[in-house]
Amino acid sequence: MKIRELLLVVGTAFFLSSCATVPPSTVIIPSVTTSSAATGVKTATPVVPQVSPAVLHPDVTHVVGPGETLGMIGQMYDVPAVAIASANHLKVSAALSPGRSLVIPKAAAFRSVITLFPSRKWKYIIIHHSATEEGDSLAFDQYHLRRGFSGGVGYDFVIDNGTLSKVDGEIETAPRWLKQQDGRHCKASHMNKKAIGICLVGNFNEGKVTEAQMASLVYLVGTLRTYYRIPAKKIMGHGQVPGADTDCPGKKFPWQEFKNRLGAFK
Ligand SMILES: [Zn+2]
């Protein structure tokens, strides 16, 4: 991921005005892409490349995550909300049901969107794993609702691993972050009231964090840490919180790599 290409748009999160007294900031990052392997086959380079608009901007399908609006989805694909509404026979103000599929016309490459709210509430960042091979914010939302968590998914952010309908490395923002509510991810040391909860999809007692997930985690934590002025010692795994009895985010979570890359993040 080319972190340098990040685009910082201040005060444009018009779709999130209910909770913040000061306009939030929206950080848009390019999608995590993997370079294709070299084939060793030489091809002639045309003088004038001819690529049809449909190839550059294909229609794609997006499964709505918890809390997402047409405005948010439009930013993810660089498509006006009104165009998505029109393509799906919706009013632009329509509330979206999580789990429904939308056609995104002429979509650009997917980008994660992170909204930052001015706040003194957030003092810690806690990293979790889902302890499942598959998942996304929608799946955890449904699971946490069945467990009786008010507000659904208990984390603030979910970093996907390419399972279900999600892109590997996609950062999903949970509704409780958009509303700036307390978390439901770490009772110990009262962290739900003061810690931003980030969950990576995967079981890191057995499997590995994908490269795309690690790049997104470093980017997300680096962005949050900078904005909320959270020192390195207050960025920890769930199991490192005093009073927590868990091995989350897994015995094989690559702490050294994470710390090295976070330290280099600017
Ligand atoms: Zn955890």
Image (cartoon, grey):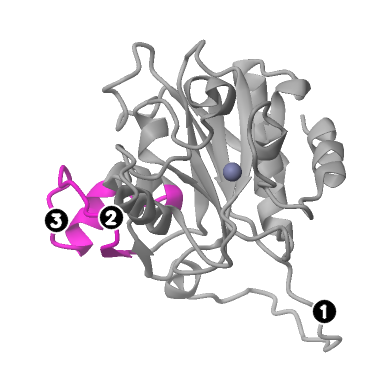
For residue 224, side relative to residue 103 (left or right): right
Give the amino acid type for the residue marked by disc 1 in the picture.
Ala
Q: Quadrant of ligand 1?
A: top right
Q: Residues within 10 Å of mark 3 (few under 14, many from 20)?
A: some
Q: Is residue 94 magenta?
A: yes
Disc 1 from disc 2: Cα separation: 39 Å
**Circle 2 sits on which residue?**
98
**Secondary structure under badge 3?**
loop
Magenta segment boundaries in residue numbering:
76-105
Give the amino acid type for the residue marked by disc 3 in the picture.
Leu
Q: Residues within 10 Å of mark 2 (few under 14, many from 20)?
A: some
Circles 3 and 2: CB distance less than 8 Å? Answer: no
Q: Earlier in the sequence, mark 3 or mark 2?
A: 3
Residue 43 image position (x, y, % from top left) = 78, 86
**Circle 1 sits on which residue?**
38
Q: Earlier in the sequence, mark 1 or mark 3?
A: 1
Disc 3 from disc 2: Cα separation: 15 Å
Q: Is residue 46 above or below residue 237?
A: below
**Secondary structure under badge 1?**
loop
- In depth, the one of 140 and 93 nearer the eye is 140
Q: Is residue 245 above or below residue 103?
A: above
**Circle 3 sits on which residue?**
90
Residue located at (34% from left, 41% from top): 149
Disc 2 C-beta below 8 A from ligand 1: no
